[in-house]
């Protein structure tokens, strides 16, 4: 997927530092260039607050949702960028990641 995520509980001070609310979710710490997340428009500092209709998603639950999706179906997420709510569709990567 091309993301580095932090738990919102762990990242509370960091979320405040980048101007995000205390809404629970996953903070995007980094986006790999040319990854599915980059193509979908996710950026460092975004807060993922929902994935496929499930609020307050954890990193493990996000990975499980992505793994369960058919190859042709993107993972739909709702995120906060500053105070603005956005939606994105992250395609499944067919490339094998070196971190897997």
Image: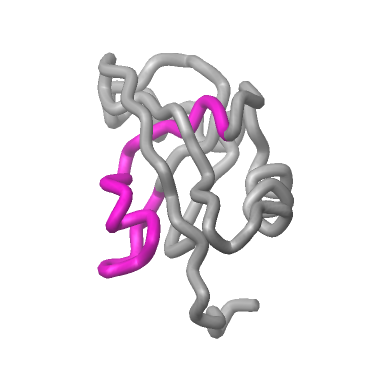
Position of the C terminus by quadrant: bottom right
Residue at x 35% of width, y 66% of height: 35
Looking at the image, residue 75 lies above or below residue 70:
above
Instruction: Say if the magenta span includes residue 59.
Output: no
Residue at x 37% of width, y 29% of height: 87
Looking at the image, residue 48 lies above or below residue 85:
below
Instruction: Say if the magenta span includes residue 36.
Output: yes
The picture places residue 6, in percent across and down from the top left corner, at 53, 45
Q: Nearer the viewer, residue 54 or 47?
A: 54
Question: Which coloring applies here?
Answer: one colour
Q: Would you say residue 43 is visible in this rendering?
A: no
Q: Would you say residue 97 is visible in this rendering?
A: yes
Report whether 30 appears left or right of 22: left
The picture places residue 95, in percent across and down from the top left corner, at 49, 80
Q: In which quarter of the image is residue 86?
A: top left
Looking at the image, residue 38 lies above or below residue 33:
above
Residue at x 54% of width, y 79% of height: 97
Q: Give the range drawn in magenta.
A: 29-51
User: How many numbered marks are there?
Assistant: 0
Q: Nearer the viewer, residue 18 or 33?
A: 33
Residue at x 50% of width, y 35% of height: 11
Report whether 72 appears left or right of 43: right
Of all residues shown, which one is farthest toward the front?
72
Report whether 1 appears left or right of 87: right
Q: Which of 10 and 86 is in front in this view?
A: 86
The picture places residue 40, in percent across and down from the top left corner, at 32, 49
Report whether 94 appears left or right of 59: left
């Amino acid at each position: 997927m091309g993301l580095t995520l932090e738990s919102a509980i762990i990242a509370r001070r960091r979320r405040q530092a980048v101007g995000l609310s205390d809404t629970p979710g996953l903070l995007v710490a980094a986006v790999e260039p040319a990854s599915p997340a980059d193509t979908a428009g996710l950026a460092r500092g975004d807060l993922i607050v929902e994935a496929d209709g499930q609020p307050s998603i954890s990193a493990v639950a996000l990975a499980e949702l992505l793994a369960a999706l058919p190859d042709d179906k993107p993972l739909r997420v709702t995120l906060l960028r500053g105070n603005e709510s956005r939606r994105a569709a992250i395609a499944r990567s067919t490339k094998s990641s070196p971190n897997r």
